[in-house]
Image (spheres, coloured by chain):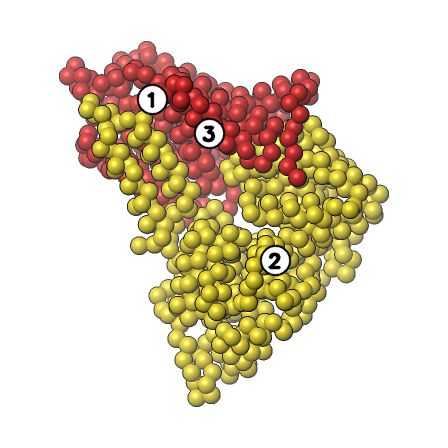
Amino acid sequence: MSDGDSKQTEGAQPVSDSDASARPDGRRSRRAFLAAGATASLVTFAGCTGGGGTETPAGDGTESPTETPTVTSTSTDYPDEVVIGSVHPFTGSTSYVGDRLHKAIRLAATIKNEDGGIQSMDGAEVKVLKGDHKNDPAIGGEVTGELIDRGADILTGTYSSPVTNAATRVAESEGVPFVIDISVAASLLQERELEYVYRAQPNSWSQSTHHVEGLTAVADQAGLDIETVGLFYVDTTYGQAIRDGLERATEGTNMEIVETASIGFGETADSQVTRFRQTDPDAIFPTVFTNQMLELVKAMQDQNYWPDVFAACASGGMYTENFQKMGDVINGALSSGYQIDLTQAKARRINERYMKTFDTPAMKGNIGMAYTTAEVLIEAFEQAGSADPEVLRRTLDDITVDEHIMAMPPISFTDRGENANPLSVMNQIQDMEAQVVYPEQYATVEVQPELIGRN
Amino acid sequence: MLTLQPLLVGPAVFAQLLVLGVLLGSIYAFVSLGLTIIFGVMEVVNVAHGAFTVVGMYVVWLVAARLELSPFLGIPLAAVLLFGIGVLMQRTTLAPLGEEAQGNKFLVTVAFLIIIIALVEMTFTATPRQLSTGFGSWGFADVYVPEGELYALLVAAATSAVVWTFLHRTHTGRAIRGTADNRQNAAYVGIDVRRIDYLTFGLGAALAGLAGALITFVQPFDPYLGNAYLTVAFVVVVLGGLGSIRGAVLGGLLVGMIRVFGAFYLPGSYYNVLILLVFIAVLLVKPTGLFGGPTRA
C-alpha cells in the first residue's frame, strides 16, 4: 500500500468512530458531519489520487517498472549502467509539469546512450528511475529513499521547494548527491549546511535580482520610469521566496513596492485586482503557477485594468499555449526567468527532438533546466569515471559544464552548492511568443518598447 | 512587506467588492446545494461531490473546446450525465450498504472521489484549462460585472428556484422533504424511500455537475479544483445549517463576501483564517448553523 493509501485509511478512522455517536433515531450528528468534512478536506488535499511512482518502459533510458537496476561490474570494474533518480510529481495538480521534466531527463539520457554511453566508464548506459512525490514532502522523502535503495547513484528533482527540502534531507543522510533541477527557495541551500546537495537553477534571490536588473534595462530602453510596484504571488513556499527576493532586490532602487497580494490554489483573483486598481502601481510582478496566471489576466480584463508594465518574475504560465487563452492583452508583456538559449544550434536541435519524441509543446525554461541538470549529472559520471557517490560529490564540487542549452554562462557550483553563474533572462511577448530581449548576448529579438506601456 | 488596505474606500471600490462577493457567494451557495440536500435526506456525507463538480467542468470543456459548440449546451448535458452517475452510484454501491452503514457509505464516497479524479486526470491530464468564451464585462461607474460570473449567477439562481419549487410544490418533492424529516415515518405512510434516495442522490449529483459547469465560466480549472470547492461547501453547509437550502444560500453568500472583502483588506491568505473564525463564531452562538433545526430540506 502506498503512502497515499495509508492516508486514506487513516483519514477514514474518525468517521468510523463518529458513527458510534449517531443519534438513536438514526440521524448522524453535527460532530459526525464535521469530522467527515475535516477528513474529506485532509483526503482531498493529500494528493492521494494517483498511482504510486509507476515507471514508463521507454527503451530509451528509462528503467522498466519492476526491475531493480543491476549495477554490476565488468571485467574493467565499471558498472554496466549508471542510474539517475528522478523525483518529480507524476500525479496531482502539477503532474503535467513533472511529466515533462522527467521526459527531458530521459531525453538527455537517451542522447548520451546513443553517443555510446559514459565513455570514461567503458560505455556504461545511463538509466533513469522515477519516483512520484505527489507534491507531498513526506512522500518526497520516502521515494527518494526508495530510489536510493533501488540503485540510484545520483538524484534530481523536484519542482516543489518543500518536497526538495525533504528529499535532499534523505539524500544528504544517505550520502548520495542530489542536484536540484527546479526548486527556487534560496533557503534550501542558504540556510542549511549540506554536502551532497547542489542546485543548477538560479535561486529566488538571483532570479529576483535579475528580474529587477533586466526590467530596469528594458524600461530604460522604453523610456519608462517604474517607481511603484505591485507584487502578486501564489501563497506557497515558491511564491513567498520570490516575494521576499523581490523585496530584497528592489531595496536601494527607485522602485517601491506599494502593494502585495497573494492567491491560493483554486481561488479567484478578483479582490486582488481590485486592490491593484485602488493602488494603481506602475508595474505588477506576478509570480504564480499557470492556473493563477490565467486567473489573474482574466480578472484584470474583467475589471478593465492593466498596469503600464506587466512583468512576471519566475512565473509559470508565460508560454505560447497560454497566451492564446489570455488574449491579445498579453502581447508586449514581460516575463523573466531562466530560459533555453534558442540562439544555439544545439538548443534548437534538442528542442525539436523533445517535441517530436514526446509529441509535446516546445521546451519551456523549466524543461530546459531539467534537461541541463541531467546533462550536469551525466557529465559528473563522465568526469568521475565512477558511480561512487563520494567520487561523484567531489566531481560536482569542481565541475564546469559549458556546453549546455540554457541562456546562461557555464554551470559550476559554489561552496554552498548553488549555481555559481545563474542567469534569468528577460522575455517579451511579441506576436504571442515569448522572446528573449535581455541580456543582449542571448536576445532573440529586440525589445519593442512601444508594446510595453501600450495598455 | 505585507500590506493592509485602508478601511475606508471609495463607493466605487466598495460597490465593486459587493458585486464580486455576491457573484462568488452565489457560486459557493450553488456548489453547496447538492451536498446539503443529500445530507438532509439521506444522512450521507458525499465527499464525491467535489469530483462530480469536476466532471461537470470537463463536460463543458468537451462541448466548448472539442466540439466547438456553445458552452451553455454543456450545462444541461453535465446535469443529465451527473444525474445518471448519481443514481447509478446510489443504486450499485450505497443502497446495498443499507441504513445502518453510514461510515461505510462515507468511505464509498471517498473512493468515488479518488477514482473519478484519477480517471479525469488520466483522460484529460492535469494541464490547466480555460474556456475561450469571449465573455467580457459590463461596467457602470467604474464598477465591473464579469459576464461569465453573471451568467453563472443567473443559471444558479434559476436552477435553485426550480429545485425549491420542485421540493415544495410537487408530490415527489414533498415526499423528499418528508423523507428528510423522518425516514421511518415516510416509509410508514407509503413513501418509497429507496426510490427517493435514488432521486435525491441523482439530484444532488446533478446540482454538483451543474455547479462545476458554471465554474468553467468563472475561472480556469484542472482535475483538482473540485477539492477546493468541496472544502468551501462543507463550511457553507455547516454554517448554513445541515440540510437547509436557505442555509446553503445564505452561508454561500456569507463565505463569498468574507472571501472577497477579506482578500481585499487583509494581507496574504489571512482571509481564509477569517472565514474559519466567523464559522467558529456562528457555531458558538448557534450550534445548529444559521438555519439548522429539526426541519430540513
Viewer-proximal residue, B157 or A134? A134
Q: Identity of the amino acid at label 2?
A: Gln
Where A355 sits versus A243, above or below? Answer: below
- C-alpha span from label 3 to label 2: 35 Å
Question: Which chain does yellow denote in the image?
Answer: A
Q: Which residue is mark 1?
A: B243
Q: Count residues near mark 2 (Cα–Cα under 10 Å), then give few for <14, some for 14-19, many for 20+.
A: few
Secondary structure under badge 1?
Answer: loop
Where A333 sits versus B71, above or below? Answer: below
Q: Badge 2 sits on which subunit?
A: A
Q: Are marks 1 and 3 in contact (CB under 8 Å)?
A: no
Where A341 sits versus A61, above or below? Answer: above
* Furthest-left residue in this view: B188
Residues beneath discs 1 and 3 located on the same chain: yes
Image coordinates of residue B209 in percent, x first then y, are 40, 31
- C-alpha span from label 2 to label 1: 52 Å
Viewer-proximal residue, A390 or B226? A390
Q: Are marks 2 and 1 in contact (CB under 8 Å)?
A: no
Q: Which residue is mark 3?
A: B276
Q: Badge 3 sits on which subunit?
A: B
Q: Which residue is mark 2?
A: A190
- C-alpha span from label 1 to label 3: 20 Å
Q: Identity of the amino acid at label 1?
A: Gly
Residues beneath discs 3 and 2 located on the same chain: no
Image coordinates of residue A172 in percent, x first then y, are 49, 65
Question: What residue sits 47% from the left and 46% below the top?
Answer: A93
Chain B visual colour? red
Question: What residue sits 43% from the left and 88% below the top?
Answer: A75
Viewer-proximal residue, A50 or A229? A229
